[in-house]
Amino acid sequence: MTKAEIRREITERKKSFQGLDVLSAKAVKNFQTLETFQNAQTVGAYMPLPNEVDIAPLFQALEKIFYIPAFDKGSGSYRLAKYTSDLKKGNFGIPEPTHPVFAPKEIDLILVPGVAFDRAGHRIGRGGGFYDRLLPQYRAVRVGSCFDFQCLEETIPSEEHDVQMDYLVTETQILKFAMNS
C-alpha cells in the first residue's frame, strides 16, 4: 500500500472506534511505565489533535521539563519550545507557547504522534514532513504514540528522510525497536 492508501485506511478504522479517551488514558499509563520516560528529565511532546493519543496528562509529571513544537520565526522552521500554560494557536491551529523558549539540542526523549506505525518503527504522519524535519534537530530517544488500530503488521513504505522510532506505545503494548537514534 502507498502512504496515501494507508492514511485513508486508518481514517476509516478511526470511524469505528468509540471511547478514544479511555484508550488514551491506558496509553498514558503505558508511557508512565516506560523506563525511558521515568528516567527522562527533558521530554519533547505534542499537543494532541482530535483522534490522537491525548498525552496532556503527562505534562503533570513532576521533575520533568516538557517541550512542544513551536514555529521559530528566526529559523523559519518548527523547533521544540518549553511548555507553559500561556499558549496561542499556531500556524495549523495547534497550541504552542506564546513566548517560546527553545529546547537545547539534546533532550532525553521525544513523544511523536502518527497516523500509522509498523512493527519496525516506521511512521506515517499527516503528509507534511513536519516531524521528519523536526526530529533530526535533536538527540533524543524517539517514542511513537498511537492506538492499536494504527499499528500495522505490514511494512510501511519509507524514504531516506523518514525518521524511525525507537519505541512505540499504544493502549495495550510497548514495542522496542533497534535503537535508531
Image (tube, rainbow, N blue to C red):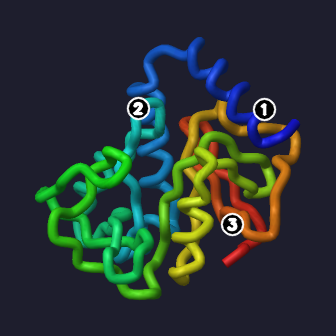
Find out whether the residues at labels 2 and 1 contact each other: C-beta distance under 8 Å.
no
Position in image of residue 94 (x %, y %)? 33, 48
Which residue is label 3 attached to? 163
Q: Nearer the viewer, mark 1 or mark 3?
A: 1
**For this view, does 80 lie left or right of residue 51?**
left
Label 2 SS: loop
Which residue is label 1 attached to? 5
Query: Which residue occupies 23% across, 55% down?
Result: 60
For label 2, the crowd category at 10 Å Cα-Cα, with few meaning under 14, some 14 to 19 and many 20 or more, is few
Q: CA distance from mark 2 to mark 1?
A: 21 Å
For label 3, the crowd category at 10 Å Cα-Cα, with few meaning under 14, some 14 to 19 and many 20 or more, is many
Q: Amino acid under label 2?
A: Pro
Which of the marked residues, 1 or 3, is nearer the chain's N terminus? Answer: 1
Which of the marked residues, 2 or 1, is nearer the chain's N terminus? Answer: 1
Residue 50 image label: 2
Q: Amino acid under label 1?
A: Glu
Q: CA distance from mark 1 to mark 3?
A: 20 Å
Query: Which residue occupies 59% across, 45% down?
Result: 126
Query: Which residue occupies 72% across, 74% down?
Result: 180
Q: CA distance from mark 3 to mark 2?
A: 23 Å
Seen in the picture, residue 29 relative to 68 is either above or below; the reply is above
